[in-house]
Image: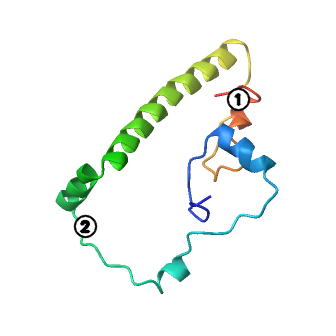
Amino acid sequence: MELAGCDRLTISPSLLEKLDSTTSSVAKKLDIAKSKNENIERVFMNEKTFRWMMNENIMATEKLGEGIRNFAADIVKLENIVKLKIQNGKPYIPIQPMVIEKSAVYHLLEDCPV
């Protein structure tokens, strides 16, 4: 909920289900207009600075690596599901780039869990 307002955020199907069942309102936490009024120290960023800051933050380094590994594993799972559907005669429906909304992950896969 702390990332409410973040554009283009990848959300797992289990979290989408949890959010779908939530009836409380969600306050937007991230807002460009509000951030312009904040006194935030500007950080000069180049590759060297970025790599140093990234390496200094253990959680960021580990979570980034974990996320990349999980995305790679999920791509393999998705490819296998699509291959099975094609082999079983399911028509291929190309998906156009879009903003992912609730349950959009299942657009191509029908009800198959990823």
* Colouring rule applied to residues: rainbow
Which residue position holds label 1? 109
Comparing 61 with 92, the one in front is: 61
Quarter assignment of residue 68: top left
Check disc 1 and give the amino acid type: Leu
In the rendered view, would you say 83 is above or below 27? Answer: above
Residue at 67% x, 38% y is 14
Q: Earlier in the sequence, mark 2 or mark 1?
A: 2
> Crowdedness of circle 2 by 10 Å Cα count: few (<14), some, many (20+)?
few
Residues at marks 2 and 1 touching, judged by CB atoms closer than 8 Å:
no
Which x, y percent locates residue 52? 20, 55
- For numbered disc 2, what is the local secondary structure? loop
Comparing 14 with 106, the one in front is: 14
In the rendered view, would you say 13 is above or below 28? Answer: above
In the rendered view, would you say 46 is above or below 62? Answer: below
Quarter assignment of residue 81: top right
Can the viewer see residue 103?
Answer: no
Q: Quadrant of the N terminus?
A: bottom right
Residue at 56% x, 53% y is 9
Which x, y percent locates residue 43? 27, 73
- Count of labels in the image: 2
Q: CA distance from mark 2 to mark 1?
A: 41 Å
Residue at 32% x, 79% y is 41
